[in-house]
Image (spheres, rainbow, N blue to C red):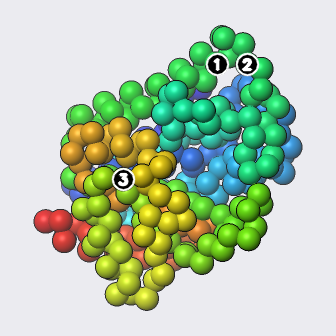
Amino acid sequence: MIPFRRIPPAPGGPPLLIVADHASNAVPPGVHLGVSPKDMLGHIAVDIGAGPLAMALAALLGAEAFIATISRLVVDLNREPDAPGLIPVISDGIAIPGNVALSSAQRAQRLAWHSVYHEQLAALIAARRPALIISVHSFTPQLASRPEEARPWPLGILYNNDDRAARPALAWAEGHGILAGDNLPYSGRDLNYTMNCHAEANDIVYLGLEVRQDEIGTSAGVARWAEQLAAMVGAVAGALA
């Protein structure tokens, strides 16, 4: 199974690249996670709305997109290859029994999908050298394991060391009445592998977007946020220029 889908830019499209690491809940043939069909539709398996949002944003901007096609429960493409949660055995209180006792061959296959994803993304970036990379994720209104923690932001802007795009994006959101989390609901300093590896390591500016899942759980929500984020990206690109 190829762990990514590449959407080419429109002719004469801008030097932008949209990346969505957690866009799919697909499980490759031969992989048995032991997770219920209901849970495979939930946030532990996929960033709900992130895939449609990334594709809608790419269409509006005429930008290239690189979108994951396997579930984060198979292998988390936004984690370091040696991270403890790379192949999760539990997620938000839900056990993943099929990941508990992998054979060396099974683990090697999971790592191979991770490697192919990042090797192909690196090759694309080296060939095209985008001026701005846009990372698209989504987050839950609250975690089942921590229901007391409120997440009031419809949008989060994440970054690690490089906040060159984050600052104008946060300013744009404030100017348009959007409550945006500054490195919230979690910090890009803690979980930012894909952007660390492919953007920060190459001195490419990036914009880390997290949209709350209840905002993009419908096609209407996706369309509304794609339009807003396209405007934000335009403002960020102008500020960087």
Q: Which residue is mark 2?
A: 102
Quarter of the image containing the C terminus?
Answer: bottom left
Please, is residue 15 above or below residue 66 in the view?
Answer: below
- Percent position of residue 37, x then y: 84, 45
Residue at image coords 54%, 65%: 185
* Marks 1 and 2 close (CB-CB < 8 Å): yes
Amino acid tagged 3: Asn
Q: Which residue is mark 1?
A: 107
Please, is residue 49 above or below residue 168 in the view?
Answer: above
Quarter of the image containing the N terminus?
Answer: top right
- Percent position of residue 80, x then y: 48, 33
Please, is residue 12 above or below residue 60 in the view?
Answer: above
**As drawn, is 238 to the left or to the right of 229?**
left
- Percent position of residue 154, x then y: 55, 75
Q: Which mark is residue 201?
A: none
Mark 1 closeness class: few <14, some 14–19, many ≥20 residues within 10 Å: some
Residue at image coords 57%, 49%: 23
* Marks 3 and 1 close (CB-CB < 8 Å): no
| Helix, strand or loop for disc 2 | loop
**As drawn, is 90 to the left or to the right of 65?**
right
Amino acid tagged 1: Arg
Choose between 150 and 195: the one closer to the eye: 150
Amino acid tagged 2: Leu
Among numbered discs 3 and 1, the one appearing first in the sequence: 1
Q: Which mark is residue 160?
A: 3
Q: CA distance from mark 3 to mark 1?
A: 29 Å
Among numbered discs 2 and 3, the one appearing first in the sequence: 2
